[in-house]
């Protein structure tokens, strides 16, 4: 009888051990689910903070231009081909440096997954507008090597798009001038007539 009891004790300890393993495995699975949820929440918070930081830096840049009449006048003067004194040029180049570094950071945030493709697309359009101004093209031609390779490639692509757009606009303008239409090559026959 004692042997049977000993066997029952062993069985009960084995059952308790198996139950403990099942409970432990369930706890691991629940912990992993909780961890995944925490990671998603942290990623959402990080993205939100990134977006907030980008907006804040854009607002500071906008205030810099809006609140500083001298800087605004210098940008207009440069954009219209006016002659700049060395200190005026230095001020504009410093402005171009600060804003371009900010854009490089925004691009980095996109590459790091902190911005969606849609968000980056909207920001990219703003960057394209910036590089349509002669100041940023001039600055970039001098200083592009101090930026990351990925950002240089992005700006290079933008500059190519800007140049293609300018060439297309010039070609289109040729056809908007009186007397600049292509000659009629149909021989006077309407292609709709047969």
Image: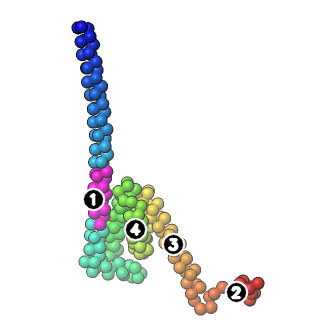
Q: Distance between the residues labelled 3 and 4?
A: 20 Å
Q: Mark 3 points at which residue?
A: 163
N-terminal-most mark, 1 or 2: 1
Report whether residue 136 is seen: no
Counting from the top left corner in percent of width and height, residue 179 is at 62, 91
Eyeballing the image, is 163 above or below 18? below
N-terminal-most mark, 3 or 2: 3
Q: Is mark 1 on a helix, strand or loop?
A: helix
Q: Mark 4 points at which residue?
A: 122
Q: Which of 129 and 114 is in front in this view?
A: 114
Report the side of 66 relative to 183 (left or right).
left
Q: Which corner quadrant holds the N terminus?
A: top left
Q: Nearer the viewer, residue 164 or 85?
A: 164
Label placed on residue 184: 2
The label nearer to you, 3 versus 2, is: 2
Q: Do the residues labelled 4 and 2 touch (CB within 8 Å)?
A: no
Q: Which of 101 and 38 is in front in this view?
A: 38
Q: How far apart are marks 1 and 2 (CA)?
A: 60 Å
Counting from the top left corner in percent of width and height, residue 156 is at 47, 64
Q: Residue at horizontal 34%, vertical 67%?
A: 99
Report whether residue 79 is seen: yes
Q: Mark 1 points at which residue?
A: 49
Q: Residue at horizontal 62%, vertical 88%?
A: 180
């Amino acid at each position: 009888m004692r042997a049977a009891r000993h066997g029952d004790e062993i069985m009960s300890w084995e059952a308790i051990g198996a139950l403990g393993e099942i409970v432990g495995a369930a706890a691991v699975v629940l912990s992993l689910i909780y961890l995944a949820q925490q990671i998603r929440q942290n990623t959402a918070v990080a993205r939100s903070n990134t977006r907030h930081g980008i907006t804040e830096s854009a607002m500071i840049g906008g205030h810099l231009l809006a609140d500083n009449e001298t800087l605004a006048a210098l940008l207009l003067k440069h954009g219209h081909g006016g002659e700049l004194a060395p200190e005026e040029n230095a001020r504009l180049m410093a402005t171009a440096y600060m804003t371009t570094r900010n854009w490089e950071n925004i691009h980095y945030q996109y590459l790091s997954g902190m911005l969606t493709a849609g968000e980056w697309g909207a920001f990219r359009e703003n960057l394209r507008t910036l590089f349509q101004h002669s100041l940023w093209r001039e600055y970039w031609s001098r200083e592009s090597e101090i930026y990351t390779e990925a950002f240089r490639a992005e700006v290079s692509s933008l500059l190519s798009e800007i140049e293609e757009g300018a060439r297309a606009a010039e070609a289109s303008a040729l056809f908007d001038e009186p007397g600049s239409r292509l000659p009629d090559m149909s021989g006077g026959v309407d292609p709709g007539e047969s």
